[in-house]
Amino acid sequence: MQLAERGAIELFITYSMLLELEEVLAYKRLYGRVTQLGYTPSQLASYALTLATPVDVARGFLPIVQADPDDDVFLLCAAAAQAHYVVTHDRHLLALVSYKEIPIATLDLFLAQEFGE
């Protein structure tokens, strides 16, 4: 989020992605880190929304991500926003490597490729 706060990257989000973000932030393995920042998962998801551009997407009839069709929304959002990357730790998305010529990368790989970090 710091990169978005500085204007170094653009974030795009759909309503269903926002709901999933809030759900993931409530996972036991992340909840402690979220609360250490002084937020609830809902508050942090709401803050992410203030940094992102909302995107409307329509799901297709055929799933893109066969192993987890709920992940399709991330790819559809990236394509609709003409994003340069999909940054994720989701194994189903990472297995695709790219979608419509949009690379799919972990945060570490994205930072290394784009910012030399």
Image: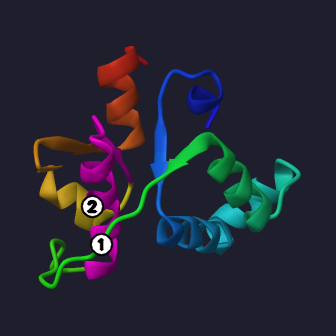
Q: Which residues are magenta?
A: 69-88
Q: Are marks 2 and 1 in contact (CB under 8 Å)?
A: yes
In which quadrant of the rendered view does residue 30 lie?
A: bottom right
Residue drawn at 48 percent across, 66 percent down: 17
Q: Residues within 10 Å of mark 2 (few under 14, many from 20)?
A: many
| Residue at the disc numbered 2 | 76
88 vs 32: above or below: above
Q: Is residue 98 left or right of residue 110?
A: left
Locate residue 6, reporting x and y percent: 63, 21
Front residue of this view, candidates 41 and 5: 5
Q: Residues within 10 Å of mark 1 (few under 14, many from 20)?
A: few
- In primary-sequence order, the first of circles 2 and 1 is 1
Could you tell me the amino acid type at mark 1? Ala
Give the total of numbered labels: 2
Circle 1 — which element?
loop
| Residue at the disc numbered 1 | 58
- 80 magenta-colored: yes
